[in-house]
Image (cartoon, grey):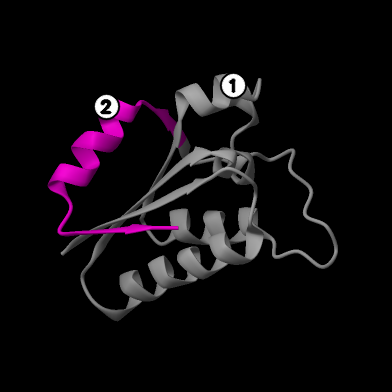
Amino acid sequence: MKVLVIFADTSPQAARYATGLRLAQARVRAEATEVQVFLIGCAVECATARRVAPAADVDVARLLVSVISSGSDVRVCSTSLADRAIDTADLLIGVVSATTGDLASLALSADRVLVF
């Protein structure tokens, strides 16, 4: 089964992102599921090495690295990166810049799409 998890938010919501990433991890561990993650809007900020989580906040970057190390693809919207002046060099290792066309292809090929 192929699952696409999309994080599309207008403001960084670490708790919501953490919930979605934990769900992605659980799907990968529970059965032979291919999980792909796509970050768009403010969610792209979570995939940068320069983001510092407040003390009370969940470390979403750590969860993303864990998802990547479990074999999942993590992509971020190139337009959202440009809108926030984030260079691809600032992305966590393993995170790839992609287009909305790529997102459309991922959505069409997925068996399930979850949006947070």
Picture coordinates of residue 65, whole percent (x, y): 55, 54
Counting residues from the start of the chain, the first of labels 1 and 2 encountered is 1
**Outermost front residue:** 10
- The image quadrant where one finds the N terminus is bottom left
Residue drawn at point x = 65 percent, y = 49 percent: 12
Residue type at tag 2:
Gly
> Where does the image place residue 99, in percent across and percent down from the top left?
36, 25
Front residue of 12/78: it is 12
Percent x, y of residue 68: 45, 53
Q: Is residue 54 left or right of residue 27?
A: right
Q: Which residue is mark 2?
A: 101
Given contact means CB atoms under 8 Å apart, are the residues at marks 1 and 2 in contact? no
Tag shown at residue 93: none
Give, as a single range, the part of the protein colored magenta: 96-116
Looking at the picture, which amino acid does disc 1 mark? Asp
Q: Residue at x 70, y 65 (%)?
A: 58
In the rendered image of this protein, does residue 94 appear above or below residue 33? above
Placement of 111 over or under 80, stated as above or below: below
Determine crowd level at label 1: few under 14, some 14-19, many 20+ residues with C-alpha closer than 10 A: few
Badge 2 element: helix
Residue drawn at x 61%, y 25% is 89
Q: Which residue is mark 1?
A: 83
| Mark 2 crowdedness (10 Å alpha carbons): few <14, some 14-19, many ≥20 | few
Would you identify the image quadrant in which residue 87 lies?
Answer: top right
Rendered image quadrant of residue 81? top right
Q: CA distance from mark 1 to mark 2?
A: 17 Å
Find residue 28 and report its horizontal and vertical position in percent.
Answer: 32, 69
Specify the quadrant that holds the C terminus: bottom left
Secondary structure under tag 1 reads helix
